[in-house]
Amino acid sequence: MVEIRRRLAALFLVAPVLCTLTNCTAPPVNPLDGRGPIVLIDSPDISSGAQLHNVVELWNRQHAYSERVTFIEGPHATDEYRAQLRARAQTADSPEHQSQCYDVMAMDILWTPEFARAGYLQPLDPADFQMDRFLRRPVDAVTLEGRTWAIPHRADAGLLYYRKDLLDAAGFDPPTTWDELRRQAVTIGARNGIGGYIGQFDRYEGFTVNVIEMIWAVGGDVLDDNGRIMVNEPAARTGVQMLADGIESGDGTGWIPRAALGYNERLSHMAFQDGDAVFLRNWPYVYRLLDDPKSPLREKFDVAPLPGPSALGGWNLGISSCSRSPATARDFIKFVTSEANQRLLFEKAGFPPTIADLYQDPALRQQFPYLDVLRQAIEDSRTRPTIPAYDDVSALVQEHLHRALSDPVSAGGMTDLLAEKLAAMLRAR
Amino acid sequence: MHHTIIAVDVAGFGTRGAWPQQKIREALLSAMRETLDHCGIAWKDCHAEDRGDGLYLLAPPNVQNKRLAECLPKELAARLHEHNVTADPAARIRLRVVLHAGEIDPDQQGQSGKAAVLAFRLLNSDALRMRLAGSRGDVAVLASAAYFHDVIENYPAAYPEHYRPVTVIEKETTETAWVFLPDDHIPVDSRKGRHRQPPVGRRPDRTFTRWARPSPPLAVLLVVLLTGGQASDVLAAVPLDRQCAEPVQLNVNVSAEKAAIIHKLVPSFVEGTRRQVGERNCKTVNVQVTTAKRSEEVIAAFGRGWSGPNDLRQVGAEPFVWLPDSAWEVEAAQKEMRAETNTNVSLVNLGSIAQSPLVIVSSRPTTGTEADATQPNDWSEVLASAQRTGRSAGQKVEYSRPSPLSSGTGMLATSVLYHARLGQPLDGRTFTRPETPRLLHDVERSIPTSDGQSDSIPCLAREQPGEVDLAMLMSEKAALDYRAGDIPGARCANDRPAAAPHVTYPRDGTLYLDHPFVMVNWNDRPVNERRQRAVRDFFDFLVGRDAQREFRLARFRDRTRTIGAVEGALPGRPVDLPIGPVDVNALLQAYEDARKSARVLFLFDVSRSMSQTPQDIGITRLQAGRNGVHEILGIGGKDKFGLWAFAERLDGHRDHRELVPMSEPERTKAALTGLVDSDRPPRLVPTLREAVASFSASDRDADVRDAIVVIAEGTSWEPDTLQLVDQLRAKPVPVFMIAFGANVCASSAWREIDRSSGGTCTQVSNSAEVGVALDGVAANLWGGGRG
């Protein structure tokens, strides 16, 4: 914040000087009213038909060249994408290097607080964006110390995809507890000679999400809201042990195929689509892929909320503090997050909307019956720890608990070691 | 004085509450007393010193070390188990134990002695923590190298075969120590019935000497440590951090070969750059490591100033540090930037951080043993051997190398082989010589690149059935990893262990990967001084003592080309191969062209005009053509050749006869001798039209170059040339006319055919000229049209 204030002050000081030089008489322009061409950075637009590009194109057609938006697609891997945003935010903050500024940044909800604290973002006026139209959870995630730092653009929460055909044949309703899920996975999996449950258990952020959801489901946590270590408490241990015992062992026990230890979102989706499992935990985008006319599972799957809370995911749009055209940037964000465009992006690309009303829209509900499940999952979701050292926490979780899952015998020892390492890491900060 | 040290630490002690901590202390003390008592050491004879959070014991000097090694691990495990089965879960004990022997100054029996310091490092090592965490039991014993070799190794009652070696790297300590899990038992009534192999002991690969060396008189020093004795509420409530400045972002792009070691080193670097701000130990740098998939992509992205629409998407975040394999890649990037007149980026090579020479790995020694005398003499010999084995059917050695587009190793491998084949400096002029494309194509057929899978080459070797021997050019580092069965990153489908491969070094020298550290300056942005400093710090860190040792441990040579004690490596420093300056970009272009495979259809004129014997050569034109073509038909590789003979109504109503359909070169070669002239008049165009049509009908592939080569007299005029030209304009296939007749190439018909097909017409009179003309064809096929 100091940064922003200092820069604003500098601009106010510079403006009158410019005026005397150019002999103008107009009052100094408020820098927050700046308009001009802007740059948008988002992760690659992999939606079918490049829908985000289309929305940008729509804006560009409606606006003069002087407010043109250039869309840059960042790296695929989210950690690299964030590294690119951080690096630019740390260099572009000077008037003579304006062209290097990413005016509008799409950010994972995990990073928004960090970017706000670091001074990379301009605070936004919630009234200006009619924030009361948005779902509560995503709004909480962009609010820090009572101020709004970004606008929720895509909401995300884990969903439970299941083989409706197989559950129906066995006379089961979709499970509402993990115990029930486990039993169904074992029964139906064995009956059909396929795996029970799969999720994202490769060593990356997806692993932390999947494991923390299980820990939450049994009433535990990794860190509590005060940053206190909870992962070696009985509840969390139960969650870890439940997953570890669930991984298939050589003797045929277990309800999670061992291959899932190498799955990310894409691989787990492919395995499910190939008929390798009864249940899949994945994000909403998978719905469209499974429902595709070419998908072998079309008509054979359905979706339910996870048996416990999901980790909240999603992407927000924020304005860089380096932007000299924040008025254009604000208008552009309003445009992209407008009800019309969110509807378009949901219909065409499957981006879950952040505007609450869209979930009540009769036409949409009829066309996409999973909207209710989606909304419930988002409303019931929880946020991962928002401490600045979250990355380090997540890395330690991945390192130790991935081993615990690979070798269930070590689950207790690895959980202890994780608690020890977390303690040392948090002490050092 | 020589002492034995026992260091003990309770896992997770710091995370327990105050009450469980008290219970643990009591139980541990009692377990230790009983254990020592049982092992013949009276507690009262030990000198004990309270360290607040631990206990310090000196045992009597008459202690039997062998008895201790035999007794302590199992007895201690038994005593702890006794406690654990009844204890509250929070008060259960899992214990790390270190056994070590070394010199300790009698006046300084405390923790300051060198031996004690090593014991503590072993005790706190991740290696030991991980082994305990992964054990079913409650105790993990780590014996130092000295203790293991002096006491345990030759004393069967201590179960030396159950100790496994682990590498411990802590601060300045690197040590191969020995882990023993005395109570890692498989419970018989295990719920899940997991019947795993018990930990595999050291293979009893040497005979135990019946009489162990007498141990030196030992005073036993006993250290019981309870570290991390803070109450658990110290960990509570980590407040939101506002005091630390935002860490500077340092994005690093690293070659696949160094990805593992850089990933391993980065956390130490980040830790080392923490700065104390008030109470806080602030992180000052965030490092993002991107592994380059293909060096070619990184080079091209630099050329575009990283501003191409897919550069961020495909290649990754803009780097501030680039760690390629070779300075040649830097040169290639700089040249690329000059070509694109891009001044936004400048690359500064701060120097080498590691070295690794290019070597050959073979699944079976090329000749006899690995002794120095059997190393190949030079790279020409390697190339010749690859060509030889390709020719004879019985002896199957498949050579391969990584692509120069994917890695610096590939660039080096390509350079040595091209240099060996051409015998010329690899400058721009060499690459434009007419014979170069054919010679390089020959290299590409003999030792092909396994493109797109260079990092899985070792997997290929493992997956090949035993009857095929493989030889691969790779860096010494990759070769030694492969030899040790340590293949990072590669996920081999087949886990079958490979036989130890052989690493050979040509005796006349080799090229080195110099692993440069390249600082990337973005000239279109303001200088971030903190980042500049972080870049320099990172370089200093990587060339510092600790990181250099890590490079050696990872089987690189350090920047002075010194290699660690690695089995299979040539001791000393292999000599540099002087190949002079290399035009890297021209090399890459030549490679792209030379590796294309070709489909060539030869059309042989067998009319009576070819039976003439020009006075100056003494053989018929047909024979001269045959001899010339014989030369260009290579062996092996993916090239395909076809052979048609033509003359008016040669085959019933048709003018041509297909002697060999598009197939392996051997068949065409064999069929050449069967070409005989006829007494029929010449007639070319209908055959040529059918030949062109045969190419149009089949699939076209960007990596396959097609050509029709006509060897003919060529002077007779034919009416349907215009239709041929139309056909070629629609679907061009290069037609190369090699004409014995005078003034054929100057005719308007052939000039038109050349233009529409992209081929050339060459007039010849003997075999040698046919050969030269075919070099021209080769240049067109494998030389990007040069020559």
Image: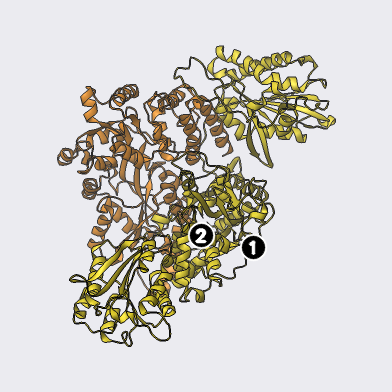
Instruction: Tell me, for residue B114, which label it has, or none.
Output: none
Distance Cα–Cα, label 1 vs label 2: 21 Å
In the picture of the structure, the residue carrying the numbered disc 2 is B388
**Neighbours of disc 1 within 10 Å: few (<14), some (14-19), many (20+):** some
When the figure is inspected, residue A314 is found, relative to residue B61, above or below; the finding is below
Callout 1: residue from which chain? B
Q: Nearer the viewer, residue A77 or B768?
A: B768
View extreme (front): residue: B679
Tell me where residue A386 appears, x and y as whole percent.
44, 38
Tell me where residue B42 appears, x and y as whole percent.
77, 14
Q: Colour of chain A?
A: orange
- Taking the image as shown, residue B153 lies to the left or right of residue B218, namely left
Residue at 42% of width from left, 63% of height from top?
B595
Residue at 40% of width from left, 71% of height from top?
B778
Which chain identifier belongs to the yellow chain?
B
Instruction: Tell me, for residue B508, which label it has, or none.
Output: 1
